[in-house]
Image: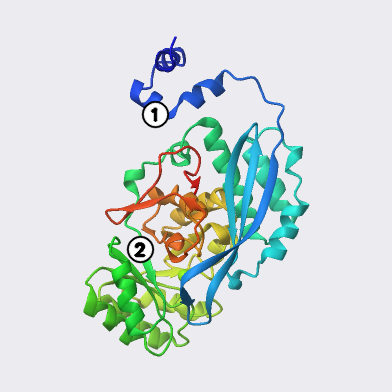
Protein backbone atom coordinates (compact mmCIF):
# COMPACT_ATOMS: atom_id res chain seq x y z
CA UNK A 1 0.00 0.00 0.00
CA UNK A 2 1.48 3.36 -0.98
CA UNK A 3 1.31 6.46 1.25
CA UNK A 4 -1.72 7.92 -0.51
CA UNK A 5 -3.66 4.66 -0.22
CA UNK A 6 -2.62 4.35 3.40
CA UNK A 7 -3.96 7.81 4.21
CA UNK A 8 -7.22 7.14 2.36
CA UNK A 9 -7.63 3.76 4.04
CA UNK A 10 -6.80 5.23 7.45
CA UNK A 11 -9.47 7.90 7.08
CA UNK A 12 -12.09 5.17 6.70
CA UNK A 13 -10.71 3.38 9.74
CA UNK A 14 -11.20 6.42 11.99
CA UNK A 15 -14.74 7.02 10.90
CA UNK A 16 -14.51 8.17 7.33
CA UNK A 17 -15.55 11.69 8.23
CA UNK A 18 -12.56 13.41 6.64
CA UNK A 19 -12.47 14.35 3.01
CA UNK A 20 -9.55 12.70 1.32
CA UNK A 21 -7.92 16.04 0.47
CA UNK A 22 -8.10 17.23 4.06
CA UNK A 23 -6.59 14.02 5.29
CA UNK A 24 -3.73 14.27 2.84
CA UNK A 25 -3.11 17.90 3.79
CA UNK A 26 -3.37 17.82 7.50
CA UNK A 27 -4.02 14.61 9.33
CA UNK A 28 -1.52 11.84 8.61
CA UNK A 29 0.29 12.53 11.88
CA UNK A 30 -3.06 12.53 13.68
CA UNK A 31 -3.90 9.15 12.23
CA UNK A 32 -0.55 7.72 13.18
CA UNK A 33 -0.75 9.15 16.68
CA UNK A 34 -4.16 7.70 17.42
CA UNK A 35 -2.83 4.22 17.11
CA UNK A 36 0.39 5.00 18.86
CA UNK A 37 1.46 3.51 22.16
CA UNK A 38 2.07 5.99 24.94
CA UNK A 39 5.58 7.35 24.67
CA UNK A 40 8.08 7.12 27.50
CA UNK A 41 9.46 10.51 26.51
CA UNK A 42 9.76 13.41 28.92
CA UNK A 43 9.35 17.10 28.19
CA UNK A 44 12.70 18.77 27.65
CA UNK A 45 12.91 22.58 27.90
CA UNK A 46 15.68 24.61 26.26
CA UNK A 47 16.03 28.40 26.08
CA UNK A 48 18.31 30.94 24.41
CA UNK A 49 18.54 34.71 25.06
CA UNK A 50 18.21 36.83 21.91
CA UNK A 51 18.07 40.57 21.21
CA UNK A 52 15.65 41.97 18.65
CA UNK A 53 16.92 44.87 16.55
CA UNK A 54 14.16 47.37 15.82
CA UNK A 55 13.89 48.87 12.33
CA UNK A 56 12.97 52.26 13.83
CA UNK A 57 13.48 53.58 17.35
CA UNK A 58 10.25 52.71 19.18
CA UNK A 59 9.06 55.88 20.84
CA UNK A 60 6.13 56.07 23.26
CA UNK A 61 4.94 58.94 25.41
CA UNK A 62 7.17 57.63 28.21
CA UNK A 63 10.26 56.06 26.56
CA UNK A 64 12.30 55.32 23.41
CA UNK A 65 14.43 52.28 22.51
CA UNK A 66 16.09 50.45 19.54
CA UNK A 67 16.24 46.87 20.88
CA UNK A 68 14.01 44.43 22.79
CA UNK A 69 15.37 41.45 24.75
CA UNK A 70 13.57 38.14 24.08
CA UNK A 71 14.04 34.54 25.19
CA UNK A 72 13.53 31.81 22.57
CA UNK A 73 12.28 28.57 24.10
CA UNK A 74 11.93 25.04 22.79
CA UNK A 75 10.11 22.10 24.35
CA UNK A 76 11.04 18.74 22.84
CA UNK A 77 9.02 15.57 23.26
CA UNK A 78 9.39 12.32 21.40
CA UNK A 79 11.63 13.96 18.77
CA UNK A 80 9.18 16.80 18.06
CA UNK A 81 9.98 20.40 19.06
CA UNK A 82 7.54 23.16 20.01
CA UNK A 83 8.72 26.77 19.77
CA UNK A 84 7.96 29.57 22.22
CA UNK A 85 9.12 33.05 23.09
CA UNK A 86 9.21 35.58 25.91
CA UNK A 87 9.45 39.22 24.85
CA UNK A 88 10.52 41.64 27.58
CA UNK A 89 9.78 45.30 26.86
CA UNK A 90 11.15 47.33 29.81
CA UNK A 91 7.76 48.36 31.21
CA UNK A 92 6.84 44.76 32.09
CA UNK A 93 9.85 44.49 34.41
CA UNK A 94 11.18 41.19 33.02
CA UNK A 95 14.67 40.71 31.57
CA UNK A 96 17.05 38.07 30.21
CA UNK A 97 18.17 37.55 33.79
CA UNK A 98 14.70 37.16 35.32
CA UNK A 99 13.45 34.84 32.57
CA UNK A 100 16.64 32.73 32.77
CA UNK A 101 16.12 32.44 36.51
CA UNK A 102 12.47 31.44 36.14
CA UNK A 103 13.03 28.89 33.36
CA UNK A 104 16.05 27.40 35.18
CA UNK A 105 13.82 26.62 38.15
CA UNK A 106 11.27 24.73 36.04
CA UNK A 107 11.40 20.96 36.01
CA UNK A 108 9.35 20.01 32.96
CA UNK A 109 11.04 16.60 32.73
CA UNK A 110 8.69 15.46 35.52
CA UNK A 111 5.94 15.44 32.85
CA UNK A 112 5.69 12.56 30.41
CA UNK A 113 2.45 13.64 28.70
CA UNK A 114 2.35 17.07 26.99
CA UNK A 115 -1.43 16.78 26.59
CA UNK A 116 -1.82 17.37 30.34
CA UNK A 117 -1.63 21.05 29.44
CA UNK A 118 -3.70 22.24 32.41
CA UNK A 119 -1.55 20.35 34.93
CA UNK A 120 1.67 21.57 33.35
CA UNK A 121 0.56 25.21 33.13
CA UNK A 122 -0.75 25.15 36.72
CA UNK A 123 2.68 23.95 37.84
CA UNK A 124 4.41 26.68 35.78
CA UNK A 125 2.06 29.40 37.04
CA UNK A 126 2.41 28.30 40.66
CA UNK A 127 6.19 28.34 40.67
CA UNK A 128 6.42 32.11 41.27
CA UNK A 129 4.03 35.04 40.97
CA UNK A 130 4.44 37.42 38.00
CA UNK A 131 6.97 36.41 35.32
CA UNK A 132 4.19 36.43 32.72
CA UNK A 133 6.47 36.66 29.66
CA UNK A 134 8.54 33.73 30.97
CA UNK A 135 5.31 31.77 31.54
CA UNK A 136 4.08 32.70 28.06
CA UNK A 137 7.25 31.27 26.53
CA UNK A 138 6.42 27.86 28.04
CA UNK A 139 2.70 28.10 27.20
CA UNK A 140 3.38 28.95 23.54
CA UNK A 141 5.96 26.17 23.12
CA UNK A 142 3.54 23.64 24.66
CA UNK A 143 0.68 24.69 22.38
CA UNK A 144 3.04 24.44 19.40
CA UNK A 145 4.18 20.99 20.52
CA UNK A 146 0.63 19.69 21.03
CA UNK A 147 -0.49 21.00 17.64
CA UNK A 148 2.49 19.30 16.00
CA UNK A 149 1.83 16.01 17.82
CA UNK A 150 -1.77 16.08 16.64
CA UNK A 151 -0.82 17.38 13.19
CA UNK A 152 -3.21 20.35 13.21
CA UNK A 153 -2.83 24.15 13.42
CA UNK A 154 -3.84 25.28 16.86
CA UNK A 155 -6.77 27.42 15.69
CA UNK A 156 -8.41 24.19 14.52
CA UNK A 157 -7.98 22.61 17.94
CA UNK A 158 -9.68 25.71 19.39
CA UNK A 159 -12.50 25.21 16.85
CA UNK A 160 -11.91 28.60 15.20
CA UNK A 161 -12.59 29.73 11.65
CA UNK A 162 -9.59 31.70 10.32
CA UNK A 163 -11.87 33.55 7.89
CA UNK A 164 -13.43 35.31 10.93
CA UNK A 165 -10.18 37.16 11.79
CA UNK A 166 -10.69 40.95 11.70
CA UNK A 167 -8.48 43.43 9.84
CA UNK A 168 -5.17 43.96 11.62
CA UNK A 169 -3.48 47.30 12.24
CA UNK A 170 0.06 48.55 11.68
CA UNK A 171 1.51 50.75 14.44
CA UNK A 172 3.05 54.14 13.84
CA UNK A 173 5.01 55.45 16.84
CA UNK A 174 5.58 59.04 17.91
CA UNK A 175 7.94 60.50 15.33
CA UNK A 176 8.88 63.32 13.00
CA UNK A 177 6.58 64.04 10.03
CA UNK A 178 9.25 62.66 7.66
CA UNK A 179 9.46 59.28 9.44
CA UNK A 180 5.66 59.16 9.72
CA UNK A 181 5.43 59.52 5.93
CA UNK A 182 7.90 56.64 5.55
CA UNK A 183 5.92 54.44 7.98
CA UNK A 184 2.59 55.16 6.29
CA UNK A 185 4.21 53.95 3.05
CA UNK A 186 5.52 50.80 4.82
CA UNK A 187 2.00 50.15 6.09
CA UNK A 188 0.63 49.84 2.55
CA UNK A 189 -0.61 46.19 2.96
CA UNK A 190 -2.64 47.20 6.03
CA UNK A 191 -6.14 48.63 5.90
CA UNK A 192 -6.07 50.00 9.47
CA UNK A 193 -3.33 52.07 11.15
CA UNK A 194 -2.64 52.47 14.86
CA UNK A 195 -1.04 55.69 15.94
CA UNK A 196 0.76 56.34 19.20
CA UNK A 197 -0.20 59.67 20.79
CA UNK A 198 0.22 61.21 24.22
CA UNK A 199 2.60 64.12 23.71
CA UNK A 200 2.07 67.78 22.85
CA UNK A 201 1.91 67.27 19.05
CA UNK A 202 -1.01 64.81 18.92
CA UNK A 203 -3.17 66.79 16.52
CA UNK A 204 -0.19 67.45 14.24
CA UNK A 205 0.58 63.69 14.11
CA UNK A 206 -2.99 62.85 13.14
CA UNK A 207 -3.14 65.67 10.56
CA UNK A 208 0.11 64.41 8.92
CA UNK A 209 -1.34 60.90 8.68
CA UNK A 210 -4.65 62.21 7.39
CA UNK A 211 -2.81 64.19 4.69
CA UNK A 212 -1.40 60.85 3.45
CA UNK A 213 -4.22 58.34 3.92
CA UNK A 214 -7.89 58.02 4.77
CA UNK A 215 -7.51 54.54 6.34
CA UNK A 216 -9.31 53.98 9.67
CA UNK A 217 -7.07 54.81 12.65
CA UNK A 218 -6.79 53.39 16.15
CA UNK A 219 -5.23 55.65 18.77
CA UNK A 220 -3.05 54.52 21.67
CA UNK A 221 -2.06 57.30 24.07
CA UNK A 222 -0.04 54.92 26.29
CA UNK A 223 -1.23 56.74 29.47
CA UNK A 224 0.02 60.04 28.02
CA UNK A 225 -2.96 62.32 28.78
CA UNK A 226 -3.37 63.62 32.31
CA UNK A 227 -6.63 65.57 32.09
CA UNK A 228 -10.03 63.99 31.48
CA UNK A 229 -11.58 67.05 29.81
CA UNK A 230 -8.66 67.20 27.37
CA UNK A 231 -9.07 63.45 26.76
CA UNK A 232 -12.81 63.90 26.03
CA UNK A 233 -12.11 66.81 23.66
CA UNK A 234 -9.55 64.67 21.87
CA UNK A 235 -11.98 61.73 21.69
CA UNK A 236 -14.55 63.95 19.93
CA UNK A 237 -11.97 65.39 17.54
CA UNK A 238 -10.47 61.97 16.82
CA UNK A 239 -13.90 60.50 16.05
CA UNK A 240 -14.31 63.16 13.35
CA UNK A 241 -10.89 62.13 12.01
CA UNK A 242 -11.99 58.54 11.46
CA UNK A 243 -10.56 57.00 14.64
CA UNK A 244 -12.28 53.78 15.77
CA UNK A 245 -11.10 53.44 19.40
CA UNK A 246 -8.95 55.03 22.07
CA UNK A 247 -6.46 52.90 23.97
CA UNK A 248 -5.16 53.64 27.48
CA UNK A 249 -5.76 57.39 27.24
CA UNK A 250 -4.70 58.23 30.79
CA UNK A 251 -2.47 56.69 33.51
CA UNK A 252 -3.99 53.45 34.77
CA UNK A 253 -4.16 54.85 38.31
CA UNK A 254 -6.70 57.51 37.16
CA UNK A 255 -9.54 54.99 37.31
CA UNK A 256 -12.35 57.40 38.16
CA UNK A 257 -11.34 59.78 35.38
CA UNK A 258 -11.05 56.96 32.85
CA UNK A 259 -14.45 55.55 33.91
CA UNK A 260 -15.93 59.05 33.42
CA UNK A 261 -14.29 59.31 30.00
CA UNK A 262 -15.58 55.84 29.00
CA UNK A 263 -19.14 56.94 29.83
CA UNK A 264 -18.88 60.22 27.87
CA UNK A 265 -16.59 59.24 25.01
CA UNK A 266 -17.95 58.75 21.49
CA UNK A 267 -15.16 56.19 21.01
CA UNK A 268 -14.68 52.87 22.85
CA UNK A 269 -11.98 53.15 25.54
CA UNK A 270 -9.64 50.16 25.63
CA UNK A 271 -7.47 49.23 28.63
CA UNK A 272 -3.94 48.00 27.95
CA UNK A 273 -1.39 48.86 30.65
CA UNK A 274 -4.19 48.69 33.26
CA UNK A 275 -5.28 45.16 32.37
CA UNK A 276 -2.66 42.44 32.46
CA UNK A 277 -4.63 39.38 33.55
CA UNK A 278 -8.11 38.12 34.45
CA UNK A 279 -7.99 39.68 37.95
CA UNK A 280 -7.23 43.12 36.44
CA UNK A 281 -9.99 42.61 33.91
CA UNK A 282 -12.59 41.91 36.61
CA UNK A 283 -11.31 44.88 38.60
CA UNK A 284 -11.60 47.22 35.58
CA UNK A 285 -14.84 45.99 34.05
CA UNK A 286 -16.61 49.29 34.76
CA UNK A 287 -13.61 51.46 33.87
CA UNK A 288 -13.04 50.48 30.21
CA UNK A 289 -15.30 49.28 27.41
CA UNK A 290 -12.62 47.03 25.90
CA UNK A 291 -9.33 45.28 26.61
CA UNK A 292 -6.07 44.75 24.76
CA UNK A 293 -4.86 41.20 25.44
CA UNK A 294 -1.19 40.38 24.88
CA UNK A 295 0.33 36.96 25.46
CA UNK A 296 3.34 38.51 27.23
CA UNK A 297 1.12 40.33 29.72
CA UNK A 298 -1.22 37.48 30.61
CA UNK A 299 1.09 34.44 30.38
CA UNK A 300 0.16 32.82 27.08
CA UNK A 301 -2.63 31.35 24.95
CA UNK A 302 -4.40 29.53 27.77
CA UNK A 303 -4.69 32.70 29.89
CA UNK A 304 -5.62 34.79 26.83
CA UNK A 305 -8.51 32.45 26.07
CA UNK A 306 -9.81 32.85 29.63
CA UNK A 307 -9.58 36.65 29.32
CA UNK A 308 -11.52 36.63 26.05
CA UNK A 309 -14.31 34.60 27.68
CA UNK A 310 -14.50 36.81 30.78
CA UNK A 311 -14.42 40.04 28.73
CA UNK A 312 -17.25 38.78 26.53
CA UNK A 313 -19.28 37.89 29.63
CA UNK A 314 -18.94 41.56 30.68
CA UNK A 315 -19.98 42.73 27.20
CA UNK A 316 -16.56 44.23 26.52
CA UNK A 317 -14.75 44.65 23.21
CA UNK A 318 -11.63 42.53 22.74
CA UNK A 319 -8.44 43.33 20.93
CA UNK A 320 -5.41 41.08 20.61
CA UNK A 321 -2.07 42.84 20.47
CA UNK A 322 1.59 42.10 20.86
CA UNK A 323 4.94 43.50 21.89
CA UNK A 324 7.91 43.82 19.56
CA UNK A 325 8.26 40.06 19.11
CA UNK A 326 9.47 37.53 16.55
CA UNK A 327 6.97 35.82 14.24
CA UNK A 328 6.85 33.02 16.85
CA UNK A 329 4.82 34.83 19.53
CA UNK A 330 2.92 36.96 17.00
CA UNK A 331 1.79 33.90 15.03
CA UNK A 332 0.78 32.20 18.29
CA UNK A 333 -1.42 35.20 19.15
CA UNK A 334 -2.88 35.10 15.64
CA UNK A 335 -4.35 31.67 16.43
CA UNK A 336 -6.92 33.52 18.61
CA UNK A 337 -7.63 36.30 16.12
CA UNK A 338 -10.97 34.87 14.90
CA UNK A 339 -12.35 35.54 18.42
CA UNK A 340 -11.57 39.27 18.65
CA UNK A 341 -12.92 42.60 17.39
CA UNK A 342 -9.57 44.19 16.62
CA UNK A 343 -6.15 42.78 15.83
CA UNK A 344 -2.83 44.57 16.30
CA UNK A 345 -0.32 41.90 15.32
CA UNK A 346 2.57 43.69 13.67
CA UNK A 347 5.38 43.21 16.22
CA UNK A 348 7.38 40.98 13.89
CA UNK A 349 7.39 43.64 11.19
CA UNK A 350 9.02 46.16 13.51
CA UNK A 351 12.24 44.09 13.78
CA UNK A 352 15.07 43.43 11.32
CA UNK A 353 16.34 40.05 12.65
CA UNK A 354 13.27 37.77 12.86
CA UNK A 355 14.51 34.16 13.21
CA UNK A 356 11.07 32.73 12.30
CA UNK A 357 8.58 32.77 9.46
CA UNK A 358 4.90 32.65 10.31
CA UNK A 359 1.80 34.70 9.73
CA UNK A 360 1.31 36.77 6.60
CA UNK A 361 -0.90 39.77 5.98
CA UNK A 362 -3.25 39.15 3.07
CA UNK A 363 -5.84 41.72 2.08
CA UNK A 364 -5.30 43.56 5.39
CA UNK A 365 -6.05 40.46 7.47
CA UNK A 366 -3.87 38.08 9.41
CA UNK A 367 -3.47 34.90 7.41
CA UNK A 368 -2.81 32.13 9.92
CA UNK A 369 -0.47 29.48 8.49
CA UNK A 370 -2.00 26.05 7.99
CA UNK A 371 1.05 24.35 9.45
CA UNK A 372 0.61 22.23 12.61
CA UNK A 373 1.01 23.90 16.00
CA UNK A 374 1.37 27.68 16.09
CA UNK A 375 2.46 27.56 12.47
CA UNK A 376 6.02 28.87 12.43
CA UNK A 377 9.22 27.58 10.89
CA UNK A 378 12.79 28.59 11.68
CA UNK A 379 14.49 30.52 8.91
MG1 LIG B 1 -1.14 49.86 24.05
Per the image, label 2 sits on a secondary structure element best described as strand
Per the image, label 1 sits on a secondary structure element best described as helix
> On the image, numbered disc 2 is attached to which residue?
169
**Image point (40%, 82%), residue name:** 175
Q: Is residue 194 left or right of residue 138?
A: left
Q: Can residue 225 be seen by looking at this rendering?
A: yes
Task: Tell me the quarter of the picture where residue 297 sits.
Answer: bottom right
> How many numbered circles are shown?
2
Q: Where is residue 253? Give x, y as percent.
A: 56, 78
Disc 2 crowd rating (10 Å Cα; few below 14, some 14-19, many 20+) is: many
Residue 25: image tag = 1
Looking at the picture, tell me which residue is in the foreground, 300 or 178.
Answer: 178
Q: Quadrant of the N terminus?
A: top left
**Image point (50%, 61%), residue name:** 353
Looking at the picture, tell me which residue is in the foreground, 232 or 81.
Answer: 81
100 over 233 or under it: above or below: above
Q: Where is residue 114? Give x, y as percent.
A: 64, 36
Looking at the picture, tell me which residue is in the foreground, 359 or 204.
Answer: 359
Q: Where is residue 154? Give x, y as percent.
A: 48, 40
Q: Is residue 112 left or right of residue 328?
A: right
**Image point (44%, 17%), residue name:** 3
Task: Tell me the quarter of the picture where residue 162 sits.
Answer: top left
Q: How are the residues colored?
A: rainbow
Q: Where is residue 158? Give x, y as percent.
A: 47, 40
Q: Earlier in the sequence, mark 1 or mark 2?
A: 1
Q: Can residue 19 be seen by looking at this rendering?
A: no
Disc 1 crowd rating (10 Å Cα; few below 14, some 14-19, many 20+) is: few
Amino acid sequence: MNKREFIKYSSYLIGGTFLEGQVAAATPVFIEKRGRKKSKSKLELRFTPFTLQLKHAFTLSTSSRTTTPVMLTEIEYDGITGYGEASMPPYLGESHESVTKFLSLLNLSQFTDPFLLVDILQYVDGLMPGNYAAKASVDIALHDLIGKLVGEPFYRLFGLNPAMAPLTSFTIGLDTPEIIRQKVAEAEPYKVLKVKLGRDNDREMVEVIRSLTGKPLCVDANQGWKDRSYALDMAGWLKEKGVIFLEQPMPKEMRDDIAWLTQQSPLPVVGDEAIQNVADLIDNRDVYSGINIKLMKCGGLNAAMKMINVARAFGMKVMIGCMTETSCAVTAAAQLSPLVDWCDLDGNLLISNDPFEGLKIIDGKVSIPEKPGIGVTKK
